[in-house]
Amino acid sequence: MRFAHMSDVHLGSWSAHPELKDKACEAFSKAADICISQKTDFIIIAGDFFDTSMPSIDVLKSALETTKKLHDGGISIYVVPGSHDFSPTGKTALSLLEAAGFVKNVANVDSDGNLVFTKINDVAISGMIGRKGSLEHDYFSRISCSIPECRYSIFVMHSAINEYKPEHLKDMAALPLSALPKGFDYYANGHVHKKFEGNIDGKPLIFPGPLFPTEFTEMAEYDSGFWIIDTEAKESKWNSVKLFDFELITIDGDNKEPHEIYEEMLKKIKSLSISGKLLLIKARGVLKNGRLPDIDFNSIAAIALEKGAFSVKKNFNKLTTKEYEEIKIDASTNVQSIEEKLIEEHCSQSKLDGFDTKEISIRLIESLSAEKQEDEANAVFENRLKESFSEILRLDKADKVPLKASFND
Ligand SMILES: [Mn+2]
């Protein structure tokens, strides 16, 4: 058997950026074509297939087209919901694809907490969901696992691992290797947006990284793709899925004036060939005087677009002025880590009786971030919010979070 392992596809990412909003869908379609031409038997998507649990109709349409193409080509898709596309109420786009028969959720346990396996020929697959704020960590201690007789077994998950955290995500909540169920031949992981090959007791534990970058820092290392694994030969092959090239301009702004930074950017743009590429501009340091808005980035972007770049993105997070030098949280880490850090700081100051303050904070933020969809009636949207609140506030009665991880419940 040969299977593909990809993760963090994030269909619908960059939704507010017209030139990038279709790229994750394009990357997935390209990956699907590679799987078809390579005659893979099935595909594992280790969480965050969608960027949100309720993507736009355009994103859903594209997801349906590509998963149908794979389905018609005889290639099954096995997924686990990740921190982005999990929904506590089960109202997620993944459940639509599952209802259509195009994907199967393999994160499932029975009422006694035993992992439930899906078998394809003689390969046994099971998995665990990923939750925002790493709420799934508790589940790992509550499951039991007995791998059925088979030639090859795969565990699909969506959690960072302590022993394998990249330096820039060192504050991310993570599981120790010892928390993972033992004895699988392959651990198909996701969540950490950086390609990495680790192991547990000598068996591969793999993070393919995002299929398309989801933020500036990932874009500046854009080298996405996925693995195809041959279960008999126990060999794996990396398949690159890169939609375009990029150029990165780095500016040291220490002790400079806004106009000097502007001129430096301009000079570098003129010296580079950026036609058809994404241009990334990163600046750091403490300005001598002036404010950040004094750097006319809009006209820089216009010049780069004129020169043929298809998109220009900047990251001035580490560029600051003297008054603003004291920043409490390192803005170079990702949104999720910042959120987790803030919640932890506040949890020590305010406690909610009868609740795990951290858990309830994360879940409430998760629910409150729901947006009304285009054409969704007010009443339907309100109901969706109410359902999700009642689910969260029932926590003190209903024996904690339900272990059953299916998103069809
Ligand atoms: Mn992700």
Image (cartoon, helix red, strand yellow):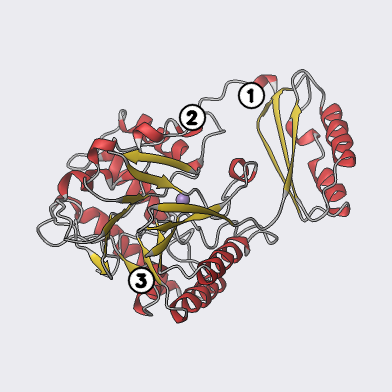
Depth order, front residue of 276/329: 276
Depth order, front residue of 375/210: 210
- For the point 37% across and 29% down, the residue is 345
Q: Kindly identify which residue carries mark 3.
A: 95
- Spatial CA span between label 3 and label 1: 46 Å
Q: Nearer the viewer, mark 3 or mark 1?
A: 3
The answer to which of marks 2 and 3 sits earlier in the sequence is: 3
Relative image position of residue 294 (x, y in whole percent): 80, 34
Which amino acid is tagged 2? Glu
| Res. 161 image quadrant | top left
Secondary structure at numbered mark 2: helix
Q: Nearer the viewer, mark 2 or mark 3?
A: 2
- For the point 87% across and 48% down, the residue is 303
Q: Quadrant of the N terminus?
A: bottom left
Q: Kindly identify which residue carries mark 2.
A: 167
- Circle 2 packing at 10 Å, graded few (<14), some (14-19), many (20+), is few
Q: Is residue 5 above or below residue 280?
A: below
Secondary structure at numbered mark 3: helix
Is label 2 in contact with label 1 (beta carbons under 8 Å)?
no
